[in-house]
Amino acid sequence: MSKFEDLCLAGSLLRALEEKGYETATPIQADAIPHIMKGTDLVGCAQTGTGKTAAFALPTLHRLLTAGQRNQPGGGKKHKKIRTLVLAPTRELTAQIGGSFAAYSRFTKLRHAVVYGGVSQVPQVRKLRAGIDTLIATPGRLLDLINQRHIDLSHVEMLIFDEADQMLDMGFIHDLRKIVSFCPDRRQTLMFSATMPPEIRKLADEWLHKPANVQTARVSAPAEKVEQSVYFVERRQKVRLLEQFLQNTAGGRTLVFSRTKHGADKIVTFLQKGKIRAAAIHGNKSQSARERALEQFKSKSPPVLVATDIAARGLDINDVSHVINFDFPEVPETYVHRIGRTARAGASGSAVSFCTSDDVRTLRGIEKLTRRKIDVALDHPELTSDIAPQPTEAQGKSFRRGSQKPDWQKSRRPKSPAGGRRKTSSRSIGGEKKSGSSRAGKKSAGASGNGHAKHRRRRPAAGK
């Protein structure tokens, strides 16, 4: 295990780390920091919760300190130019990165700013005009401020992409290309991500020059100390199962993931009716409401936080005891990010998923990705059997394979009045039975007078 003092960081940074109680670097930090301090481009891949932010923040601050204030002729604040740009996909993640830069640089004169959408740009622009060394931004708001000529990236020395794969998933690729075009060609570029799909590799080949590759864990491997389990439940019973699980499970902070924003709000409403404190966080919430929900979640008496995948990454909150997948994610990789909100910094945690018959394929995909079978919750006496019918072990296996549904999950077909199949060889039309060919049926329909035969004009008789 490497200690931070062995990494030759600036004294002011070591002092800040000592005050926070950090002595030993995580594997991603120990491997990445030396490369970054040398000025090498880098692609870093590590599972969530392993300290990727400090892995690029500390060496970035070190390089800014040791390179001197080149862009400050006369030493005035107004002459400062943006020397480092950090891009992140969500407001919460940019705010968290900004908090890390503030904590690590507290004993220096380096300044930074955080810009993102959903709030007024006035205080952000005011801070930009005061002069900063590091800018942390989401792509959308950054481009807005560039177009308004509030931001100049022509002096950027370091360009950092955090959670690059998520930015691609959110459709930021065109914005990222525009932003890169505003930066100098001669720069140091860092790309960090929890997963490394082929698309990220292609961008790394395009934007990075002979990068060092650092991967400290198997891609998409969940933390070892996360206890995973799955309940098989009917869709209409999921909210009642969630309510009883929360009432009967002792835990600290509980994070519930919903697939949709509307679904998150409905879950909160249901829990509040059951006298369970809950709050929602998703993209339709204002930034002030999202920040308020997070502050409550970090308090000593936290509510249950119901979130969409906006919270799957970038939320570094200690002591999250349970992560509940009320809905399975769209892609298996997101499951790893979700359960990474618990068991952080060496702690243990529990990840529970509610699986309906529609989720079996996703469950199989998750197990294939993580190379780990998720335990079926078979014996939970605290949950009433009428809410969460528990399959036998054999039924659970067949359900998992998708070969057949357990008896408690099978749908019943309504029986015909005669108790069997209806005969299709003949049926009543206009009071008569249809038989023979369709042409004969049309004739009988016309003959009955009650069918749908067309009225035809009768030819006049000859001589009239």
Image (cartoon, rainbow, N blue to C red):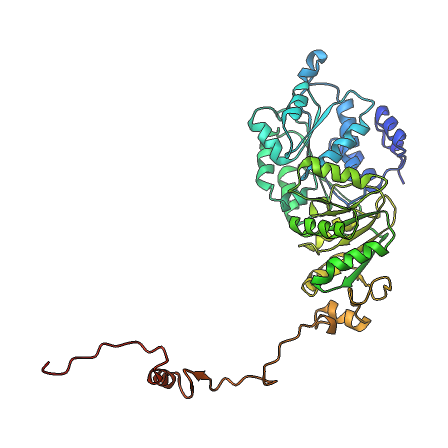
Instruction: Judge whether 124 appears above or below 461 on screen.
Output: above
| Residue at image coords 69%, 51% | 266
Q: In which quarter of the image is residue 412?
A: bottom right
Q: In which quarter of the image is the N terminus?
A: top right
Q: In this view, does 180 lie to the left or right of 97?
A: left
Q: Quadrant of the C terminus?
A: bottom left
Q: Is residue 344 left or right of residue 460?
A: right
| Residue 433 percent coordinates (x, y) | 43, 87
| Residue 253 percent coordinates (x, y) | 83, 46
Instruction: Judge whether 159 appears above or below 110 on screen.
Output: below
Q: Can residue 336 be seen in this view?
A: no
**Count of numbered marks:** 0
| Residue at image coords 63%, 37% | 207
Foreground pick, 145 / 262: 262
Instruction: Judge whether 400 appears above or below 340 on screen.
Output: below
| Residue at image coords 78%, 32% | 100
Foreground pick, 373 / 229: 229
Q: Is residue 410 visible?
A: yes
| Residue 304 percent coordinates (x, y) | 78, 47
Q: Quadrant of residue 458?
A: bottom left
| Residue 154 percent coordinates (x, y) | 61, 25
Q: In this view, does 456 lie to the left or right of 120?
A: left
* Residue most extreme to the left: 463
* Residue most extreme to the top: 74
Instruction: Judge whether 302 appears above or below 434 on screen.
Output: above
